[in-house]
Amino acid sequence: MTLETRLLSKFKNVPNVTVIDAEAWLNEAAFQYGYESPDKVPARESALLLLLAQAEGARNIAMSVAHYFKYQDAEESVDKTMLAEQYRKLANDLRDEYKRNKAELSGSAFRAMRRIDRP
């Protein structure tokens, strides 16, 4: 199964997500990850690349639905304004999961707590 297919399966219920979107998100994720293309990423790190690509996809969807609206008339109410916020939160959650998994893969999961008495 290709990376594009695996990524598309994560977004299968999101309208208008195409293979072209998946390829673009994978390319951007590979670039952010430090590789020229998704093909250059070692197989053992493909799960990390997919997490990063999912975060990129969720962020792009959030940008594309940011203009959604809210209206109400006497009998009907539609509110799609929170859709972008939900995708933004999903993107942040995926990015956090990516960082945790990358630290585990590299063997460096050490984190120093921020001191309260210092900014």
Image (cartoon, helix red, strand yellow):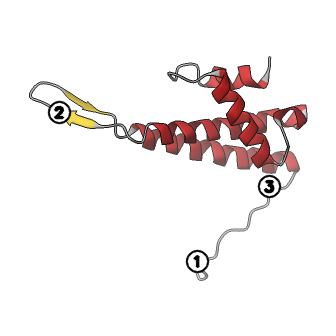
Q: Mark 1 = which residue?
A: 116
Place of residue 57 in the rendered image (x, y in percent of width and height, measured from the top left): 61, 36
Q: CA distance from mark 3 to mark 1?
A: 21 Å
Residue 71 relative to residue 67: left or right = left
Q: Nearer the viewer, residue 48 or 29?
A: 29
Question: Residue at left 75%, top 37%?
Answer: 27
Q: Is label 1 in a helix, a strand or a loop?
A: loop
Place of residue 63 in the rendered image (x, y in percent of width and height, measured from the top left): 49, 42
Q: CA distance from mark 2 to mark 1?
A: 46 Å
Q: Mark 3 = which residue?
A: 109
Please identify, in this view, whether the residue under mark 2 or under mark 1 is nearer the observer: 2
Choose the circle earlier in sequence order: 2 or 3: 2
Q: Is label 3 in a helix, a strand or a loop?
A: loop
Question: Residue at left 57%, top 24%?
Answer: 17
Q: Nearer the viewer, residue 37 or 88?
A: 37
Amino acid, disc 2: Gln
- Which label was assigned to residue 72? 2
The residue lying furthest to the bottom in this view is 117
